[in-house]
Amino acid sequence: MLAIQTPYTLVSQKHFFKDTNLSTRNQAYLAISKEKDAQFYYYVPFAERQAKAILSDPNLYTSMTWRYAGSPCAHYYSNKKVVPLYETKDFEKRLKKPTSTLYLLENGDLKSIDGIKYQLRYQNPEYSVIRY
């Protein structure tokens, strides 16, 4: 199994993704894959956060609905553990003290961290990867 998996990983990450038109979110995941961290925190986009608030009744979703933060390919492209943050209060709590942690967020959410000195690691028209 290891012999089969290793060549696939090398081919898929070095050759296939280079020539493919990826979404801006997947491009951000690829940028995250180059970071040393074993995981990153994903402040889920507003629409996804809103959907979770609307569908708060457990009868309206399955146990897997919120596991992948609306993006099941996040782990695949980033090769990291993804920790989704659906609640603004959870995101703000994590930002109370700097820990050199990697975060992915929509550019529209950057205004929520005005006044915080963070390191911009990657940015495209829709997403930013920061270290704080």
Image (tube, helix red, strand yellow):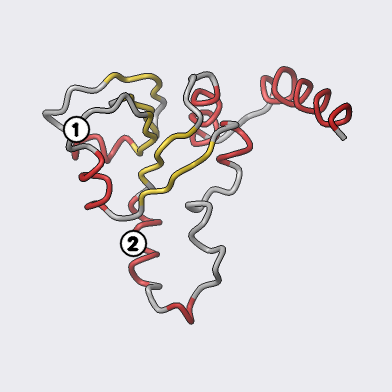
Q: Secondary structure at mark 1?
A: loop
Badge 2 crowding class, 10 Å Cα cut-off, few under 14, some 14 to 19, many 20 or more, is some
Residue that sits furthest to the left in the current view = 115
Q: Sequence order check: which comes first, mark 1 or mark 2? A: 2
**Residue 15: image location, x then y, percent:** 74, 19
41 relative position to 82: left or right: left
Q: Secondary structure at mark 2?
A: helix
Camera-nearest residue between 1 and 51: 1
Give the number of marks: 2
Disc 2 marks which amino acid? Answer: Gln
Q: Which residue is mark 1?
A: 97
Q: Which residue is mark 2?
A: 50
Camera-nearest residue between 2 and 104: 2
Of marks 1 and 2, the one in the foreground: 1
Disc 1 marks which amino acid? Answer: Lys
Residue that sits furthest to the bottom in the current view = 59
x 49%, y 26%: residue: 32
**Looking at the image, is 65 positioned above or below residue 110?**
below
x 63%, y 29%: residue: 21
Q: Quadrant of residue 4?
A: top right
